[in-house]
Amino acid sequence: MAELWLTLADLPEQGREVHIADQSVWKDPVHEFQIQASIAVPLTARLFLLPGPEGLLVRGDIAGQVQMPCDRCTRNVRIDLEAGFEVFEAYAPEEQEGQGAEGLITDRQGTPELNAAELLWEQFLLALPTKPLCSETCRGLCPKCGQDLNDGSCSCDSEGSDPRMAVFKNLKIKS
Ligand SMILES: [Zn+2]
Ligand SMILES: [Zn+2]
């Protein structure tokens, strides 16, 4: 997992905008967690950090393009990412230290720092479609022979009708 820490020590009261274009923030965990996605157009992120008395407000967005396999036919689909988000992160309370419940803000050598890599990774995952489709009308793969039905019907289709429907053929409606 890539590391990217933003120090909060010298944040001005009115906040600060940070731009991130280091692809390893997304590329490393995509590889590490074997996510079915690759970056097609480099991602860029903007983070606006606004400090408050209780915590940090992070407003931001991620833009770029990823490539993912279609959920039905497995063909590669390019997906435009344009995700805005707003996260409030409380300053790490002392008693949580060492309990494994680590937030996005950690005290590092006496300075509070934001784990920007973790934040941007979480937001990237949230922005990915759970069922990417090459097209709304994608016909998918034949469950029997695996043929891509977008390329045309396979022979499984044309071999007679559904056997379950044959029962109804012989039904006669009594009048
Ligand atoms: Zn498809
Ligand atoms: Zn088939």
Image: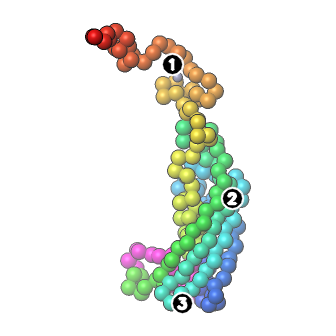
Q: Residues within 10 Å of mark 1 (few under 14, many from 20)?
A: few
Magenta span has 72?
no
Q: Residues within 10 Å of mark 2 (few under 14, many from 20)?
A: some
The amino acid type found where label 1 is placed reads Cys
Point out the frontmost of discs 3 and 1.
1
Tell me the number on the disc at residue 64. Answer: 2
Q: Is residue 2 visible?
A: no
Q: Nearer the viewer, residue 66 or 96?
A: 66
Image quarter for residue 47? bottom right
Q: Where is mark 1, residue-wise?
A: 156
Q: Where is mark 3, residue-wise?
A: 110
| C-alpha span from label 2 to label 3 | 35 Å
What is the magenta range?
Answer: 98-114
Residue visible at 28% across and 11% down? 175
Q: Relative to 53, is 45 on the left or the right?
A: right
Image quarter for residue 138? top right
Q: Is mark 1 within 8 Å of ligand 2?
A: yes
| C-alpha span from label 3 to label 1 | 67 Å
Q: Is residue 53 visible?
A: yes
Callout 1: SS: helix
Residue visible at 35% across and 15% down? 168
- Residues marked 3 and 1 touching at CB (< 8 Å): no
Q: How many marks?
A: 3
Sequence-wise, the earlier of marks 3 and 1 is: 3
Point out the frontmost of discs 2 and 3.
2
Callout 3: SS: loop
Place of residue 22 in the rendered image (x, y in percent of width and height, measured from the top left): 69, 67
Residue visible at 65% across and 50% down? 79
Sequence-wise, the earlier of marks 2 and 3 is: 2
Place of residue 118 in the rendered image (x, y in percent of width and height, measured from the top left): 55, 69
